[in-house]
Image: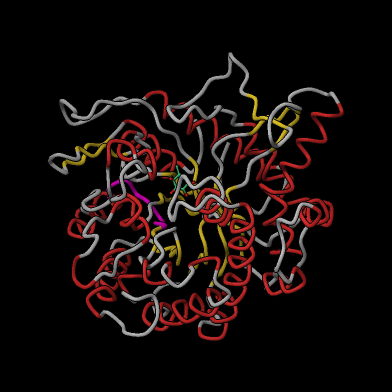
Amino acid sequence: MSFPADFLWGAATSSYQIEGAALEDGRGECIWTRFSHTEGNVKHGHTGDVACDHYHRYAEDVALMQALGLRAYRFSIAWSRLLPQGTGAINQAGVDFYNRLIDKLLEANITPFVTLYHWDLPQALQDRGGWTSAEMPEWFAAYAALAAERYGDRVKHWITLNEPWCIAFLGHHLGIHAPGIRDERAAFCAAHHTHLAHGRAVQVLRERLPNAQVGITLNLAPIQPASDDPRDQEAARGFDGVQNRWFLDPIFKGMYPPDIAAYLTARGALDGLDLESVRLAAQPLDFLGVNYYTRILIRHAPNSPQGYEIYLPPDAPVTDMNWEIYPQGLRDLLLRVHREYAPPGIYITENGAAFPEPERVEGDLLEDSARVAYLEQHFKAAAEAIAHGVPLKGYFVWSLLDNFEWAEGYTKRFGIVHVDFATQKRTLKRSALYLKQVIQCGALS
Ligand code: FCB
């Protein structure tokens, strides 16, 4: 099974999860700093204050990427490094950090893929309403314009937002991510503003960088009924409507899915939103970024408040996140997105797995056979999708480094490179060498 010669193999990270230096060199506070410093939000009270100390060790980390033969690297910019208050005054030291990183990547022949927003909103903007504020699209557009102006001479691939579903629902409905709000209406309001912000950012990037490749990254999952009971099927269709279509339809069709919009309108969840304005989200894109981790099985559950529940078969193989390992779901998902939405290009912008691993490593290689098997199966599923005509152009493994896994703190290790958080020592895992070999051969053996 082989991949196209120009297939962009890489790894992904995000600013708050690896950089550390949370308040250094003029960086403004972000919502994850505030959230993780508030008791009870993150396991063991972990924070991203130091994380992988990538802010100081970026050169070593780029050298590692080069040694692994990575062709591309997806990282995010911390908005509050550039604009400590979210708008207004520019922090040159923050701008310069990404200049150094981008230059190092280019020297190493690694294509930078920049995500403008991977969840670390400037706290100053949260104080003004954050994603529930109608001003967000313009705040984001101004930030996107600044990033384009400072980095657009060298960065050709831009991702506006990472996983707007998580921004909206983990952050504003379930409250398990920053800013920790628990309010369904706030969540749909935030989701609406992610759409408008994305649309405005694409416009701004296009104006300033006519040759750039622009996309967005969504966390998509195949949603399947747990049985062929029609009630399970209906519940699964509803769940898919919020998880997948609430984001895909505005971006590719300029409208919300009518069945879900009708249901939500009836329960008042969309009060105050001008649903028609979502057409702004449908800007022409060069690619869709897909983050895939698992499928979700749904069954109806009349006694639960939502009327359904997520079902995990008792014998399902799972990762340390308790997410089912289901590689076929990646192929199915890519085929569906291609068939129903036909983006001109697709990148897998995240795929990978956490497994229990030691905090400290003896020797210079960590054997992580479960992750190697996970990656191999998912690479195969991607190759099958390509064989079926999906315009898949690249694949970013999540993640380059073990890092701060949000509400799970440092307890979940996703890296293909192990990080000892006490010493910051990086140790390769077998999966890193496996990825290197796949990149070198351009094929799966
Ligand atoms: C995704 C996030 C990423 C990482 C992985 C495990 O939802 O985009 O930052 O936490 O999950």
**Image coordinates for residue 387, horizontal then vertical, percent:** 68, 42
Q: Is residue 232 left or right of residue 40?
A: right
Q: Is residue 262 above or below residue 275?
A: above
Name the residue located 26 percent from the left edge and 65 percent from the top edge.
Answer: 104
Q: Is residue 309 above or below residue 415?
A: above
Question: Between residues 328 and 322, which one lies in front from this camera angle?
Answer: 322
Its colouring scheme is secondary structure
State how many labels appear: 0
Q: Quadrant of residue 262?
A: bottom right
**Image coordinates for residue 377, horizontal then vertical, percent:** 54, 30
Name the residue located 55 percent from the left edge and 66 percent from the top edge.
Answer: 132
**Image coordinates for residue 338, horizontal then vertical, percent:** 73, 51
Q: Is residue 131 left or right of residue 257?
A: left
Question: Between residues 210 and 243, which one lies in front from this camera angle?
Answer: 243
Q: Quadrant of residue 325?
A: top right
On the rendered image, what quadrant is the N terminus found in?
A: top right
Name the residue located 24 percent from the left edge and 48 percent from the top edge.
Answer: 52
Residue 391 colored in magenta in the image: no
Q: Which residues are magenta?
A: 67-74
Q: Is residue 284 left or right of residue 317?
A: right
Question: Between residues 173 and 6, which one lies in front from this camera angle?
Answer: 173
Residue 69 colored in magenta in the image: yes
Question: Between residues 390 and 166, which one lies in front from this camera angle?
Answer: 166
Name the residue located 21 percent from the left edge and 51 percent from the top edge.
Answer: 50
Q: Decide if residue 348 is in sight here.
A: no
* Residue lying at the far left of the rendered structure: 423
**Image coordinates for residue 424, horizontal then vertical, percent:** 16, 44
